[in-house]
Image: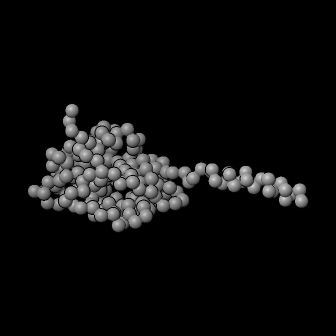
Amino acid sequence: MRKLLTALMLLPVLIAGALYAPTAQAEGVVFLTRHAEKSLDVPGDAAPLLAVGNDRARTLARMLVDAGIGELVTTDALRSRQTGAPFAELTGLQPQVMTREEEVAYAARLRQAPDAKDRLIVGHTRNIPRILEALGVPNGGQVKLDPDTDYDNLFVIQMYPDRPASMIRLRYQIAKPN
């Protein structure tokens, strides 16, 4: 009887502990964006950014410079590298340059072994949904981007070791010079 009484007295403490126990420890954050506005006059991966695209890349860099990002990944396309360049310049980070397929594989590796490092990945319209899916974002592969207008998306993905990643989709405007 005494054991039963002790167990009943401890039950509220155990329940309270379970209710207020910290949730799963978050790992690193991935900031994922599409390259900025590109020239349509140059075909393929050699297309450079337009002036407005350079402005957007500088805005992104200023926006994220204090976010604690420790790694920058771009594709080998000129527009992707140019989008990441202002951030690299402000932070001193050396970009990791990959093909589009390598970026998706890189994201899958992050999902398998998340760490505490925060990253900026600059992708493309077609590989952003694939990257989101590879990172473990529920329905990430269903994200739609308009190739003609969606240059202002910033996906913020929180990685967890034991549950699906969470995502916030933001839009940002080009900062006007002072």
Image side of residue 124 versus residue 42, left or right: right
- In the picture, the quarter occupied by the C terminus is top left
Residue reaching furthest right?
1
Q: Residue at x 15, y 49 (%)?
A: 50
Between 145 and 118, the one nearer to me in the picture: 145
Between 115 and 97, the one nearer to me in the picture: 115
Q: Is residue 76 visible from the viewing direction of this image?
A: no
Residue 52 is situated, as x and y percent measured from the top left of the image, at 17, 46
Residue 102 is situated, as x and y percent measured from the top left of the image, at 34, 60
Residue 111, picture quadrant: bottom left
- In the picture, the quarter occupied by the N terminus is bottom right
Between 106 and 4, the one nearer to me in the picture: 4
Q: Is residue 52 above or below residue 43?
A: above
Image side of residue 114 versus residue 141, left or right: right
**Count of marks, rendered view:** 0
Q: Residue at x 15, y 45 (%)?
A: 51
Between 89 and 167, the one nearer to me in the picture: 167
Q: Is residue 72 visible from the viewing direction of this image?
A: yes
Q: Residue at x 69, y 55 (%)?
A: 15
Q: Is residue 119 above or below residue 107?
A: above
- The colour style of the image is one colour
Image side of residue 136 versus residue 48, left or right: right
Image side of residue 108 versus residue 175, left or right: right
Q: Is residue 73 above or below residue 92?
A: below
Residue 125 is situated, as x and y percent measured from the top left of the image, at 26, 61
Q: Residue at x 29, y 56 (%)?
A: 123
Residue reaching furthest left?
41
Residue 26 is situated, as x and y percent measured from the top left of the image, at 51, 51
